[in-house]
Amino acid sequence: MALTIAVDDPGAKDVQDLLAVHLAFCHTSSPPEYSHALDAVGLLDPALTVVSAREDSRLLGIGAIKQLSAAHGEVKSMHTREAARGRGVGRAILVRLLALASERGYRQVSLETGTTPHFAAARALYADMGFTSCAPFSDYVDSPYNTFMTIWLDTKAPRPMVRAVEPKG
């Protein structure tokens, strides 16, 4: 069965159901005041684009990219259904989110994740994808429960050419 990674509707019932699982995981893995996971309303922010991984029509994972500025995005709400872990679902979502960031002209993508052992696999994935530790960004503050990571996108890579067409007249 093929994995399909695509922009998805954050209001879809299965996306909302997986987000509820994600929130429960985050809130039991970090003290609530240090858990920055988005709730259902937060996922509807127009600055966010939600991406899903589906096998056939079954939702296996979600992730989002949030625009912080014209050149900076943030990865949010990454979660893979427990039964689908270890199959590359999270990596495939992250690859798509970074592609979206590049298409939008972001030069930097950052993220916040937990420091507890529950988040070890996520931290390993981010590091393997090229993210490195960084200082808190946006409105985040340093804490023993939060890890901040960032990646600089290759701004020297060729971008799609856009050719202006003069109107015929």
Image (cartoon, rainbow, N blue to C red):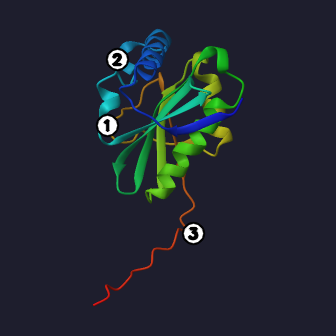
Residue position for label 3:
156
Q: Which residue is drawn at 44% across and 15% down?
A: 17
Q: In this view, does 155 lie above or below 128?
A: below
Q: Which of marks 3 and 2 is nearer the N terminus?
A: 2
Question: Closer to the camera, 167 or 95?
Answer: 167
Q: SS class of the residue under badge 2?
A: helix
Q: Quadrant of the N terminus?
A: top right
Q: SS class of the residue under badge 3?
A: loop
Residue position for label 1:
139
Q: Quadrant of the C terminus?
A: bottom left
Q: In this view, does 41 lie to the left or right of 134?
A: left
Q: Earlier in the sequence, mark 3 or mark 1?
A: 1
Q: Which of marks 3 and 2 is in front?
A: 3
Residue position for label 2:
33
Q: Which of marks 2 and 1 is nearer the N terminus?
A: 2
Are circles 3 and 1 on residues that touch, CB within 8 Å? Answer: no
Q: Residue at x 60, y 44 (%)?
A: 95
Amino acid on which the number 1 mark rests in the picture: Asp
Label 1: few (<14), some (14–19) or many (≥20) C-alpha neighbours in 10 Å: few
Q: In this view, does 37 lie above or below 157?
A: above
Residue 124 image point, x, y percent: 66, 31
For residue 6, the mark is none
**What is the C-alpha distance between the residues marked 3 and 2?**
39 Å
Amino acid on which the number 2 mark rests in the picture: Glu
Residue 94 image point, x, y percent: 57, 39
